Image (spheres, rainbow, N blue to C red):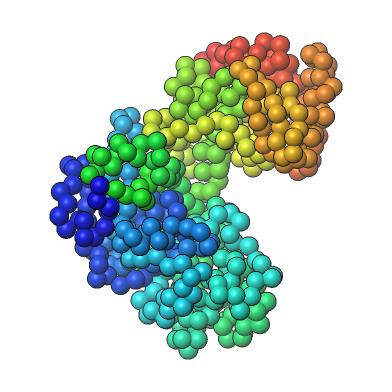
């Protein structure tokens, strides 16, 4: 089978459902991208492709491989081309869109060609830097050195690039770059700027360079949202037979996408994503959008997955199709998560409707056990603020959020700690629970006092809620919370998760 390349496209007749646009060969390189993985290719590069098709950007992306091992060689073998398959529900109907993306010009491995990387800094057309180097990527490394070619850390590589550009253009104010980090950390732009300045100081770079970084470069804070399922290993033969070519970089993701960018308005004019119908929000304050995502999307996961898993289900899609769990998730979102957030209600409900449709996506198998990873810290960040604020607004505890806390605590029962893992058990069989070691050891010790009585359930609830290392506060001070959590713990043990949850859902109807 022929491999995807520009020469192949010259004689290729695509199937009716594949979109092909490959008129980008002469466009200048305007974007430097750290990361060649599935997410950026299904998100940022796809967006630049849409702009190019409409003649609104007219630029290409140079991809930098951030670590020694990666996909740059495969990317160059395919002339930067790859097939993107976006699938999901649209107005309740299964929908699929397939497209060959041609916004990437080439890839660079700085570990084998450092000079090619630095040469990009000398390009006057370069304007933007995009990155996705994992949550750990934006971190200052005091041992990193400018003598390394390349520096070990992402901030080190970026600082070297900016310094080379500063020197090449003699500190020209017009040659500053706009950074658009996509790492999943709060205030990612602010943190990236901080690490670049720390690196510059550690390397003893001149104050003039530091001033240029601060005054003439933009570090935007961003929030990204799209589930990208990546290379479709289980379907690849079937897909390639349909397409009629081999693609080593096939990428898959959901239809939904959202990019919130906190940056000056002039940047929005240079990147007119909204003019081609992309869901990109330019703002001077991204906090409400982050709150909406964390509390509704992530909160719905964390507030429902422990119960669904103990009920005996395996995936999010199975949960949403279940007659009991599906109702539970919808009511959790509409009755408790949305009303607990003091933001525009229309904005919240529209996002909540999208979340429900995304959870039902038949093309994505999202396993509950993988979402259970580090559940206690997730509950603290995602669900505890909703529980507390609901109480403050309504003067009563939210029933389902309180139950979800008890369900979470129950997941850690029947466990034996083995390293950073817990060998645990549910009615359906054994499973492995992963969390921080102190958390696992705490729950094993706490559950050891439980003997099936209501009194011992009260003891477990009280000890768990008092753990300030997990919650950063003593939750026993929340009126009625200890008693209600204890009651649910006892019900889950004595009646089972299925009966307890069914009674809860019936009471809410």
The answer to whether one can see residue 456 in this image is yes
Residue 53 screen position, x and y as percent: 24, 58
Quarter assignment of residue 498: top right
Q: Nearer the viewer, residue 493 or 115?
A: 115
Can you say whether 430 is above or below 272 in the image? Answer: above
Residue 210 screen position, x and y as percent: 59, 80
Residue at the (79%, 35%) spot, across then down:
441
Residue at the (53%, 58%) spot, across then down:
133
Quarter assignment of residue 271: bottom left
Q: Residue furthest bottom?
A: 170
Residue 415 screen position, x and y as percent: 74, 27
Quarter assignment of residue 481: top right
Q: Nearer the viewer, residue 420 or 284?
A: 420
Residue at the (40%, 40%) spot, across then down:
233
The answer to whether one can see residue 190 in this image is no
Residue at the (63%, 62%) spot, across then down:
139
Q: Is residue 457 left or right of residue 308?
A: right
Can you say whether 118 is above or below 338 in the image? Answer: below
Residue 208 screen position, x and y as percent: 58, 86
Can you say whether 412 is above or below 345 in the image? Answer: above
Q: Residue furthest front?
A: 1
Q: Is residue 192 left or right of residue 349?
A: right
Q: How many marks?
A: 0
Q: Nearer the viewer, residue 318 or 293?
A: 318
């Amino acid at each position: 089978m022929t491999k995807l390349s520009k020469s192949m496209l010259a004689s290729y007749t695509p199937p009716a459902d594949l979109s092909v646009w490959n008129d980008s060969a002469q466009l200048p390189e305007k974007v430097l991208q750290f990361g060649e993985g599935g997410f950026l290719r299904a998100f940022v590069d796809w967006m630049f492709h849409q702009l190019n098709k409409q003649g609104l950007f007219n630029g290409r992306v140079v991809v930098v491989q951030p670590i020694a091992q990666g996909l740059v060689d495969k990317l160059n073998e395919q002339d930067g081309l790859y097939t993107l398959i976006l699938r999901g529900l649209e107005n309740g109907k299964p929908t699929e869109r397939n497209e060959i993306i041609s916004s990437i010009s080439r890839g660079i491995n700085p570990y084998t060609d450092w000079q090619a990387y630095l040469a990009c800094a000398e390009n006057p057309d370069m304007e933007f830097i995009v990155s996705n180097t994992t949550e750990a990527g934006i971190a200052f490394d005091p041992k990193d050195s400018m003598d390394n070619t390349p520096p070990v850390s992402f901030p080190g590589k970026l600082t070297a690039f900016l310094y080379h550009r500063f020197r090449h253009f003699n500190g020209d104010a017009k040659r500053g770059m706009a950074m658009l980090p996509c790492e999943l950390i709060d205030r990612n732009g602010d943190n990236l700027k901080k690490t670049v300045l720390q690196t510059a100081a550690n390397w003893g770079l001149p104050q003039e360079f530091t001033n240029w970084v601060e005054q003439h470069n933009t570090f935007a804070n961003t929030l990204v949202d799209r589930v990208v399922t990546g290379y479709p290993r289980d379907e690849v033969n079937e897909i390639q037979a349909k397409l009629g070519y081999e693609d080593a970089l096939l990428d898959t993701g959901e239809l939904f996408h959202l990019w919130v960018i906190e940056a000056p308005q002039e940047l929005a004019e240079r990147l007119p994503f909204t003019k081609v119908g992309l869901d990109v929000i330019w703002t001077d304050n991204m906090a409400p959008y982050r709150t909406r995502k964390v509390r509704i999307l992530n909160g719905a996961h964390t507030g429902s997955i422990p119960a669904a898993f103990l009920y005996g289900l395996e995936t999010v899609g199975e949960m949403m199709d279940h007659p009991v769990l599906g109702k539970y998730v919808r009511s959790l979102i509409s009755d408790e998560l949305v009303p607990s957030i003091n933001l525009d209600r229309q904005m919240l409900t529209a996002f909540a409707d999208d979340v429900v449709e995304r959870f039902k996506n038949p093309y994505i198998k999202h396993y509950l056990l993988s979402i259970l990873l580090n559940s206690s810290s997730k509950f603290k960040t995602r669900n505890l603020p909703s529980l507390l604020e609901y109480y403050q607004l309504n003067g009563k505890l939210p029933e389902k959020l309180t139950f979800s806390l008890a369900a979470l605590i129950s997941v850690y029962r029947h466990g034996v700690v083995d390293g950073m893992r817990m060998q645990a058990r549910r009615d359906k069989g054994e499973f492995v629970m992963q969390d921080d070691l102190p958390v696992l050891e705490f729950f094993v010790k706490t559950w050891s006092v439980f003997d099936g009585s209501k009194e011992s359930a009260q003891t477990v609830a009280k000890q768990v809620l008092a753990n300030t290392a997990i919650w950063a506060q003593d939750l026993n001070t929340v009126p009625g919370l200890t008693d209600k959590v204890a009651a649910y713990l006892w019900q889950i043990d004595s009646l089972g998760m299925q009966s307890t949850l069914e009674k809860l859902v019936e009471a809410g109807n």
